[in-house]
Amino acid sequence: SWVVLDENTKDGTTFLLADIILDSQNFDYNGISSTPTYNNDYSESYIRKWLNETFLNTAFEADEQKKIVTTSVDNSVMSTGYQVNPNACGKTSDKIFLLSYSEAVNDQYGLELSDSRIKQSSDYAKSQGLYVGADSGNSWWLRSPAPDPIVANFTVRGVTNKGDVASYINANYTYRGVVPALYVKL
């Protein structure tokens, strides 16, 4: 099921977020070379491609896919929660996407408190390797990169099992959850 974050009565779209963690995937990992490389550029990430290809085609029937709106997704510096972030990328056009930092703490979406960001997980996500802690929730990815130049190319923001927003999660971690977001026109 999905949580309604916003309804736009002008254009008839509804902004939805999965109410639980649906899967466990890495943000980005390329193991083709002998030295694995991974980065936090959402526009080039594995997770973005996975959401808009594998997940989209597996989770939704053809008639449902027609209702999903291709969205201009803001990946600007301001969406990352920092004043300066050399790792921010340009806008992307996506049907399915992860929340940015600014969306994940947005009081208009009801996400301003840590408790509002705590997510349980599906059994499928657990079977895919999601780390399940002793606390009630589980951690999940955001699309916003961390700005630190020392670890610039491989850390991403995420939400912890306690609902706090973390700044530095390695992009190659495979045990973080995926909470898809999308706009639909009903």
Image (spheres, rainbow, N blue to C red):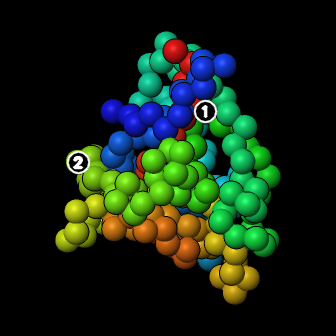
Report whether 67 appears left or right of 175: right
Give the number of the disc on residue 95: 1
Report whether 119 appears left or right of 112: left
**Dividing the picture into quarters, in which one does residue 69 lie?**
top right
Q: Position of residue 120 (x, y in %)?
A: 28, 53
Q: Nearer the viewer, residue 32 or 175?
A: 175
**Dividing the picture into quarters, in which one does residue 92 lie?**
top right
| Residue placed under numbered mark 2 in the picture | 123
Q: Position of residue 13 (x, y in %)?
A: 59, 23
Label 2 Cα neighbours within 10 Å, binned few <14 / some 14-19 / many ≥20? few
Residue located 36% across and 49% down the image: 21
The reply to whether residue 16 is in sight is yes
Label 1 Cα neighbours within 10 Å, binned few <14 / some 14-19 / many ≥20? many
Q: Amino acid at mark 1?
A: Lys
Residue located 73% across and 82% down the image: 149
Q: Position of residue 4 (x, y in %)?
A: 45, 34
Report whether 44 appears left or right of 51: right
Vertical order, 68 against 164 (above or below):
above
